[in-house]
Image: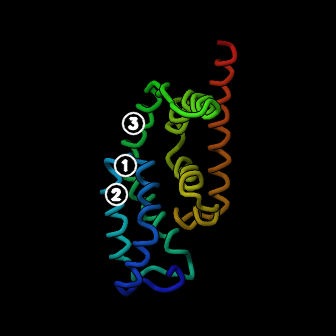
């Protein structure tokens, strides 16, 4: 499927069926469920219109679709940053049902969720794209490079810069928690 051109409707339909859910999850996480349907629809519309330009020797169809989706997400940068800032101000849900160990882990994760969202919002959009393609989409460094149309070394430097900023932001939060 990813090894052949997408110039016929059946090949494209197979790519759509294989990757729609994954691309939708990624976009929904990045932009929220309200915007996901439109962006994913536009992603596949653009892919369909440009299917003759798809080069299977350059990238897998999934990587190509992530690139299109990420470019569309870039058009929503201000909205994404506002959403992450709003998340950073929301109180975590303390009513987590389940086994005691799961509750402890969930409460710890929820207490950091606000701070992580705030730290992500402070990242440069290009660095945030790299982090989220790696963490949410599970793409390799090489696939992120292809999806974003940047060299592999640039992916690594953006990830390194983002890690340092996130580590610094979150270590301050943890230090404050230890003092409190």
Q: Which residue is mark 2?
A: 39
Is tag 3's residue or tag 2's residue first in the polypeptide sequence?
2
Crowding around mark 2 (Cα neighbors within 10 Å: few <14, some 14 to 19, many 20+) is many
- Residue beneath the point at 66% across and 24% down: 174
Q: Residue 72, percent across and down? A: 39, 58
Q: Quadrant of residue 173?
A: top right
Is tag 1's residue or tag 3's residue first in the polypeptide sequence?
1
Q: Is residue 36 left or right of residue 104?
A: left
In the image, 15 versus 146, the foreground residue is 15
Q: Can residue 169 be seen in the rendering of this structure?
A: no
Q: Which residue is mark 3?
A: 82
- Residue beneath the point at 49% across and 74% down: 61
Q: Residue 62, percent across and down? A: 50, 69
Q: Quadrant of residue 12?
A: bottom left
In the rendered image, the vertical position of residue 4 relative to residue 161, given as above or below: below
Q: Which residue is mark 1?
A: 76
Q: Is residue 81 left or right of residue 45?
A: right
Can you tell which of label 3 and label 2 is closer to the viewer? Answer: 2
Q: Can residue 125 be seen in the rendering of this structure?
A: yes
Asked whether the beta carbons under mark 1 and mark 2 sit within 8 Å of each other, the answer is yes
In the image, 126 versus 32, the foreground residue is 32
Crowding around mark 1 (Cα neighbors within 10 Å: few <14, some 14 to 19, many 20+) is some
Real-space CA distance between mark 3 and mark 2, rounded to the nearest whole angstrom: 18 Å
Crowding around mark 3 (Cα neighbors within 10 Å: few <14, some 14 to 19, many 20+) is few
């Amino acid at each position: 499927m990813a090894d052949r051109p997408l110039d016929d409707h059946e090949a494209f339909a197979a790519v759509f069926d294989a990757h729609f859910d994954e691309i939708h999850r990624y976009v929904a996480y990045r932009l929220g469920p309200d915007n996901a349907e439109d962006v994913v629809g536009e992603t596949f519309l653009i892919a369909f219109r440009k299917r003759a330009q798809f080069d299977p020797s350059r990238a897998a169809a999934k990587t190509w679709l992530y690139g299109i989706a990420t470019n569309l997400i870039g058009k929503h940068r201000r909205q994404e940053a506002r959403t992450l800032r709003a998340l950073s101000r929301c109180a975590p849900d303390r009513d987590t049902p389940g086994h005691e160990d799961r509750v402890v882990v969930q409460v710890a994760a929820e207490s950091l969720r606000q701070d992580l969202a705030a730290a992500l919002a402070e990242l440069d959009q290009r660095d945030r794209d790299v982090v989220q393609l790696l963490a949410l989409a599970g793409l390799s460094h090489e696939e992120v490079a292809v999806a974003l149309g940047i060299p592999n070394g640039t992916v690594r430097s953006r990830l390194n810069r983002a890690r340092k900023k996130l580590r610094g932001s979150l270590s301050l939060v943890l230090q404050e928690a230890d003092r409190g």
